[in-house]
């Protein structure tokens, strides 16, 4: 949560109150006050959560519009603290702070096998590419659009011979 009380209030308004309010407005627009009261009829265990979900798409658009006016207005910038966390293995009790972290032997063996497999496939691909003949570049020219019953635009058919006979 934001440290400044005004920032905290603005964040709460943008993230929690705005979606609920927009859902209420939409329900009033569609069905009047009865539609709003239907959200609180006991059929949902969390009526405010339901309204928040209904209003979230519209709230996202409103926040984006506010951000277009002034960056950070719709989606407030939240101050965070970033700190470096040391890497821990799956079994932190087995390692002491003095010992270097080493991956388990079976993971290392799997990695080596995968690298060998990738290397052999890459070598096979390079061999096939070197042995494959290079196809000539396709000829360019006007494409015949043909008449009715003939291949036309978007068919991928280039009937240059028919165009020459016309």
Image (cartoon, rainbow, N blue to C red):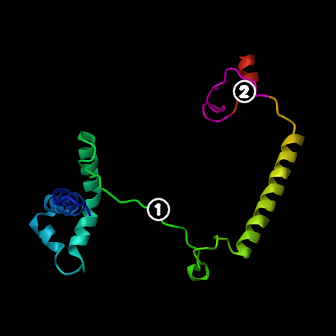
Mark 1: which secondary structure?
loop
Query: Left or right: where does residue 38 sit relative to residue 94?
Result: left
Identify the residue position indicated by label 2 in the image: 159
Instruction: Choose between 49 and 11: the one closer to the eye.
Output: 11
Residue 66: x and y in percent read 23, 45
Q: Quadrant of residue 95?
A: bottom right
The stretch drawn in magenta includes residue 142: yes
Q: Quadrant of residue 12?
A: bottom left
Q: Quadrant of residue 100?
A: bottom right
Q: Label 1: how many residues lie within 10 Å, few (<14), some (14-19) or many (20+)?
A: few
At a point 76% along the width and 71% down the height, the residue shown is: 109
Query: Left or right: where does residue 24 sit relative to residue 144?
Result: left
Residue 1: x and y in percent read 26, 64
At a point 23% along the width and 80% down the height, the residue shown is: 43
The secondary structure making up most of the magenta span is loop
At a point 85% along the width and 52% down the height, the residue shown is: 124
Instruction: Choose between 30 and 102: the one closer to the eye.
Output: 102
Identify the residue position indicated by label 1 in the image: 84
Residue 103: x and y in percent read 67, 71
Work out which quarter of the rendered image holds the C terminus and state it: top right
Residue 162: x and y in percent read 73, 23
């Amino acid at each position: 949560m934001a440290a400044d009380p005004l920032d905290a209030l603005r964040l709460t308004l943008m993230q929690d109150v705005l979606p609920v309010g927009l859902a209420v407005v939409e329900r009033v627009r569609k069905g009047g006050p009865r539609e709003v009261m239907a959200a609180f009829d006991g059929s949902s265990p969390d009526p405010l959560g339901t309204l928040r979900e209904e209003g979230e798409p519209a709230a996202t658009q409103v926040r984006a519009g506010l951000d277009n006016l002034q960056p950070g207005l719709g989606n407030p910038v939240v101050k965070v603290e970033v700190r470096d966390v040391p890497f821990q293995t799956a079994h932190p009790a087995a390692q002491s702070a003095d010992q270097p972290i080493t991956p388990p032997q079976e993971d290392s063996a799997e990695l080596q096998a995968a690298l060998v497999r990738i290397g052999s496939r890459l070598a096979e691909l390079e061999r096939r590419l070197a042995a494959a003949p290079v196809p000539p570049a396709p000829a360019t020219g006007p494409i015949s659009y043909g008449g009715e019953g003939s291949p036309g635009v978007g068919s991928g058919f280039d009937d240059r011979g028919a165009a020459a006979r016309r």
